[in-house]
Image: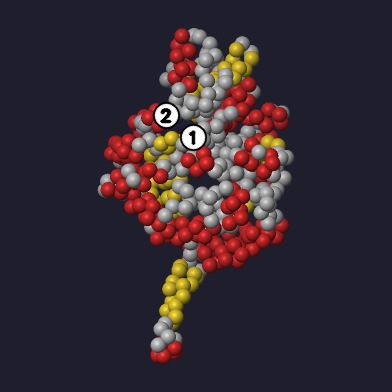
Amino acid sequence: MTEYARQRGIAIDTASRMRVHASEFIADSASEILADDPDVVGFTSTLMQNVSSLALAGELKRRRPGLTVVFGGSNCDGPMGHALHRNHRFVDFVVRGEGEYAFPALLDHLSRATPPADVAGLCWWDGESSRANEVTRRTVAPGDIPSPHYDQWQAALDASPTAEYVHPKLVVEGARGCWWGEKHHCTFCGLNGSAMAFRAKPGGRLWSEVDRLVRRHRILDVITVDNIIDMAYFKDFLPLAADSGWDLRMHYEVKSNLSADQLALLGRAGAVHIQPGIESLNNRALELMDKGVTGARNVRTLRECENHSLTCTWNYLYGFPGETAEDYGSVVDQMPALVHLQPPGGAFRIQLERFSPNFANPGLGFGERRPAEMYGHVYDLPEDELADLVYLFDTPPAGIGGETEERLKRAVTQWRAGHPGSSLTLEQEQEQEQEQGHGSGGWATSRC
């Protein structure tokens, strides 16, 4: 693992120092959970949460074999859920897909001691055989998307000796799925998994949830977990937030082709941080992504973010089959003129994600793939099992490379370095021709 990290320039000093505390943390966590004498313990796993969740689940079952352990979350979607179940005997059940209907149905079976063969998408043990029920196409209705309650969390935070070092935020959910992905699934994106269908709570209901949580917990930082904002919220939810008088600090994921008025409304409503999925300023690359936007429009979005004090998070993505060095030359040459606008977090080659069109359709250029090498340092499993379990895959590089790739990375690095001290100024120069009736000349210049 150390050599793997060194080759990729990944600093793991902090993780290595913390490693010695992992066993104690798992033991303390298991003791705290078991002190409540639960019958069922559930884990929601997403992104990089599998290992910690499995470690804790294994310790719980070691101490109390009769305890029922259930896993769910995006790391359990599709074939990943069955692979997790069949390779970890201490996991009793895995809910694949959304859990609002499946999990209560499972609890009903547990209370009646009946086999859960009719619970859609559920993985369960039939003796020593791991069974996977057929997944349903039914998605959770907007009215059934739950509203969070944070009273226990607030009590734990208030009692914690680390409370003064924590900056708490309220997490809310207004929508699921992606309305753009339903029409044009971005080729590199594996988010939403098997539940792309877009659904959203009415804006009035979402605002009442936010208002209730802000009043109850006296916290103004609000993180929305929606993968994309419901465009209807520009007519109801955002105006309600803007008129509320709350000094909110909201985060939202949006599409990068919002109008100037829409971005202004986000600012008035208290959205101080947005993630607009800009991805590139290169028209050809954006076409290959199926983003439905141009590079010029993305630059305009960056400009409007400056106008309305919106912090904009984005990464410059490359490595799409079909892109060429010629696609990048003029864009890279113009980057110094953009130094006053918020830069990307970096320039990154795309990875192959499960559920993305690039993964589902090898004809798009990623026919050769294998589980990402990092997983071999995490799981003691054969590659054919990893192929079902993991989310990221290694594949031969596509698109640009060599000097073009290095030029792009250097330009982004210089943009990031120059941005904090940069400004955009308008300079006016009175020319001699003005006396002859030719008026004045003027231009804008970006400086750092």
> Distance between the Cα atoms at labels 2 and 1?
10 Å
Q: Which residue is mark 2?
A: 141
Structural crowding at the residue carrying mark 1, measured as other residues with C-alpha within 10 Å and reported as few (<14), some (14–19) or many (≥20): some
The residue closer to the viewer here, 306 or 10, is 306
Q: Is residue 277 left or right of residue 361?
A: left
Q: Is residue 23 visible?
A: no
Q: Residue at x 55, y 36 (%)?
A: 47
Residue 69 to residue 274: above or below = above
Q: Residue at x 54, y 58 (%)?
A: 295
The residue closer to the viewer here, 181 or 59, is 181
Q: Which quadrant of the view contains residue 309?
A: bottom left
Disc marking residue 197: 1
Residue type at mark 1 is Ala
Residue 335 to residue 217: above or below = below
Residue extending furthest toward the front: 183
Question: In this figure, which colouring scheme has been used for the structure?
Answer: secondary structure
Residue type at mark 2 is Ala
Q: Is residue 439 left or right of residue 124?
A: left
